[in-house]
Image (tube, grey):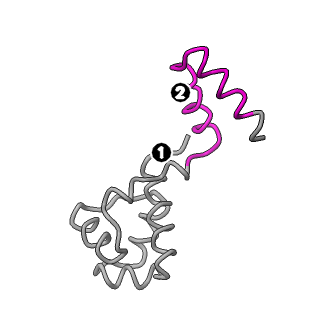
Amino acid sequence: MQSTIKLFGRRIKEIRKKNNITQEKLAEMLCLDNQTISRIETGNFFTSYENLERMSKILNVEIKDFFDFEHLKDKEDLKKDLIKEVEKMDTNALQKTKKFIKEFI
């Protein structure tokens, strides 16, 4: 299971790369050193709210987008999430879901 701070770092990196901005350039724009950006992206450091606000403007995203990392979860986390949802379903919903999964895979 990946920690939230690691997922946050991966998400920052993903958004930064989509914007074609290097770590060095982002660090310069935020008045931080390159090592700080690297530490954030590897999940070894979390940044201040002020830096999050500035980063969101530079990367043209809302702050909440930095925490949208459902797609970055590993297989075990996804399985756990799926099991939680399946346990909430009634029999009819389970049957439909099973049929959908069989057709999908």
82 and 74: which one is in front? 82
- On residue 85, the disc is 2
Q: Residue at x 38, y 59 (%)?
A: 65
User: Which image quarter is the C terminus in?
Assistant: top right
Q: Position of residue 72 (x, y in %)?
A: 55, 52
Question: Magenta span covers which residues?
Answer: 73-101
Question: 95 or 53: which is nearer to us?
Answer: 95
Please say whether residue 97 is one of the residues in the magenta stretch.
yes
Task: For mark 1, give the secondary structure.
Answer: loop
Badge 2 element: helix
Q: Is residue 1 above or below residue 44?
A: above
95 magenta-colored: yes
Residue 51 percent coordinates (x, y): 26, 68
Q: Residue at x 72, y 34 (%)?
A: 101
Position of residue 20 in the picture relative to residue 37 (left or right): right
Along the line of sight, which residue is nearer the eye, 72 or 100?
Answer: 100
The amino acid type found where label 2 is placed reads Glu
The residue shown at (55%, 51%) is 71
Q: Tag on residue 3?
A: 1
State the quadrant of the N terminus. Answer: top right
Residue situated furthest top in the rendering? 91
Measured Cα–Cα span from mark 2 to mark 1: 21 Å
